[in-house]
């Protein structure tokens, strides 16, 4: 007797690769941003919670959404679209180039749904055409650009790190013409960005993701500098998981870090975008000690910060300050900072932040 096998069609909600990437990209834009006093939140828990919120909108309430979120998380980790950072346990995660591209494109679409910036098309870009003649310092390769690898820098990074060759080991040198613009985005990652229930840091982080996609498509170069007690450049694969820190606001360190980065760029246009919601409350002294004062405008902190703005002006960089707060002391200081740097100060809201920044970049060409 023949055996009858019934065919069960796959569930319309089964996750294939494309749906998993789309779900993951959407979730990366909705990660919880507020840290606890014990320290930053666990990246994996943040991602799981965000996946569940996105799944609830797609699959409805109940256990089905939780199951869909868990399946998506397991597949993201299993396919290597999200990786646990070596030496950091499960606390820190990194996005793969494929997931990062999906997330940055989605961030751009969300910020500018009516008039999305046009993709200029495949390489070569205007301003970077012709034979590749390396002339600048080595830098990490950006996803989507030509693989004009600098063998020495790539091998050095690989050997020093050990293990298999990874995406972050790849290094290139700018060719003839270089990139068209070097943009430093300084994000205030201090605790005030998430205090009192205000959602200021989420829009700022999504702005960073959107600019990562837009600048890369134009052939420009972007550095996202997160500043709190200190200032550090955030690698692209960490951008989606960036969160505010329970710390002070060291604006001077951010401006100084931007200068060091810009000096190594061969771009014709240098732009610094500073996004903050408050006045500076910390500086790093010559001996490395952090000097802090959260009460009012401390003259020592103010003068150190203005000095960095003056150095930025002498470097030939333009400074634009986007104010997410309306405290009178903060507004007065921000206008003085812009005056010293010969830049401009822009009062905005978290909701309008992305549009205001992109409009300025688009107008500049």
Image (spheres, helix red, strand yellow):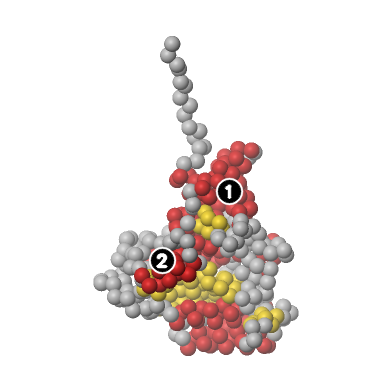
Q: Residues within 10 Å of mark 1 (few under 14, many from 20)?
A: many
Q: Return the residue nearer the eye: 360 or 38.
A: 38
Identify the residue at image location x=48%, y=48%: 79
Q: Which mark is residue 51?
A: 1
Tell me if I can see residue 149 in this picture: yes
Q: Earlier in the sequence, mark 1 or mark 2?
A: 1
Q: Residues within 10 Å of mark 2 (few under 14, many from 20)?
A: many
Q: Which mark is residue 327?
A: none
Residue 256 percent across, percent down from the top left: 54, 82
Q: Return the residue nearer the eye: 361 or 309.
A: 309
- Pointer 1 and pointer 2: residues touching (CB < 8 Å)? no
Tell me if I can see residue 196 in this picture: no
Q: Return the residue nearer the eye: 299 or 11.
A: 11
The residue pinned by badge 2 equals 170
3D distance between C-alphas at marks 1 and 2: 31 Å
Q: In the figure, residue 249 lies in which quadrant?
A: bottom right
Q: Secondary structure at mark 1?
A: helix
Identify the residue at image location x=33%, y=64%: 146
Residue 359 percent across, percent down from the top left: 46, 68
Q: Is residue 19 above or below residue 256?
A: above
Residue 263 percent across, percent down from the top left: 45, 82
Identify the residue at image location x=31%, y=71%: 128
Identify the residue at image location x=49%, y=52%: 80
């Amino acid at each position: 007797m023949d055996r009858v096998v019934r065919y069960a069609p796959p569930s319309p909600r089964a996750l294939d690769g494309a749906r998993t990437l789309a779900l993951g990209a959407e979730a990366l834009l909705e990660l919880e941003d507020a840290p606890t006093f014990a320290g930053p939140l666990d990246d994996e828990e943040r991602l799981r919670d965000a996946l569940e919120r996105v799944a609830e909108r797609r699959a409805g309430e109940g256990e089905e959404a939780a199951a869909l979120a868990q399946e998506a998380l397991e597949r993201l980790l299993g396919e290597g679209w999200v990786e646990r950072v070596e030496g950091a346990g499960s606390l820190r995660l990194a996005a793969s180039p494929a997931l990062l591209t999906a997330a940055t494109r989605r961030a751009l679409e969300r910020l500018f749904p009516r008039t999305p910036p046009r993709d200029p098309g495949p390489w070569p870009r205007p301003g970077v055409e012709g034979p590749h003649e390396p002339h600048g310092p080595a830098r990490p390769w950006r996803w989507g650009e030509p693989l004009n690898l600098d063998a020495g820098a790539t091998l050095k990074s690989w050997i020093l790190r050990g293990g298999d060759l990874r995406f972050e080991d790849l290094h290139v040198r700018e060719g003839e013409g270089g990139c068209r613009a070097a943009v430093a985005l300084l994000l205030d990652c201090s605790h005030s960005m998430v205090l009192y229930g205000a959602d200021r840091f989420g829009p700022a982080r999504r702005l960073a993701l959107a600019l990562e996609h837009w600048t890369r498509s134009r052939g420009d170069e972007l550095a996202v500098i997160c500043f709190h007690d200190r200032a550090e450049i955030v690698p692209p694969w960490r951008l989606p998981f960036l969160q505010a820190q329970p710390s002070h606001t060291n604006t001077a360190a951010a401006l100084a870090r931007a200068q060091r980065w810009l000096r190594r760029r061969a771009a014709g246009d240098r732009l610094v975008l500073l996004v903050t919601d408050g006045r500076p409350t910390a500086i790093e002294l010559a001996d490395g000690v952090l000097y802090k004062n959260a009460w009012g405008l401390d003259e020592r902190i103010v003068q150190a910060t203005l000095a960095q703005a003056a150095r930025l002006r002498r470097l030939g960089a333009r400074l634009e300050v986007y104010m997410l707060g309306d405290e009178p002391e903060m507004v007065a200081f921000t206008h003085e900072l812009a005056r010293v740097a010969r830049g401009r100060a822009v009062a905005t809201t978290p909701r309008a932040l992305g549009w205001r920044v992109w409009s300025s970049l688009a107008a500049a060409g």
